[in-house]
Image (cartoon, rainbow, N blue to C red):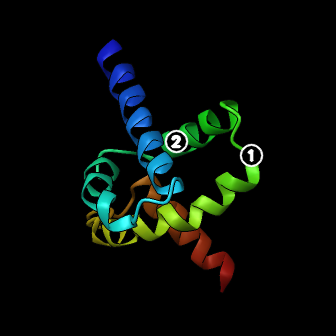
Amino acid sequence: MSEVIDNKANRVRILKDIIKHLHAGNPPEQVRRQMREIVQQTDYSEIIAMEQELMAEGMPVEEVRSMCDLHSQVTREVLVQIPTSKTIAPGHPVDTFRRENEACAA
């Protein structure tokens, strides 16, 4: 279990370093490869943790918000390439949830 926590903390640390490099003015092209690798292993909670750590270290909220556009520009192509999940089997709770939402919207 500790290896999962350590991996998460390491990914957050790497993301934070990448964002700091972008914020310092490094061109997105310089960190694109590294960002592509880490984003494929990262979930949204880790991105939120990274942003919270930056703010805890004294980075103003406005700067973190302004960097969102910058790091989303770098990750956009990676996120688009993430394969979609397989179809959900009929009767699966997610399938039922989707069908209920579609029925409510109609």
Return the residue nearer the eye: 77 or 54. 54
Q: Position of residue 8 (x, y in %)?
A: 39, 30
Return the residue nearer the eye: 33 or 44. 33
In which quadrant of the rendered image does the C terminus lie? bottom right
Q: Amino acid at mark 1?
A: Pro
Residue placed under numbered mark 2 in the picture: 45
Return the residue nearer the eye: 22 or 103. 22
Q: Residue at 27% across / 70% down in the picture?
A: 81
Q: Position of residue 13 (x, y in %)?
A: 43, 33
Q: Residue at 40% across / 70% down in the picture?
A: 76
Q: Residues within 10 Å of mark 2 (few under 14, many from 20)?
A: few
Mark identifier at residue 60: 1
24 up-or-down from 4: above or below: below
Q: Position of residue 40 (x, y in %)?
A: 29, 52
Secondary structure of the residue carrying tag 2 is: helix
46 up-or-down from 72: above or below: above
Q: To which quarter of the image does residue 101 belong?
A: bottom right
Q: Amino acid at mark 2?
A: Ser
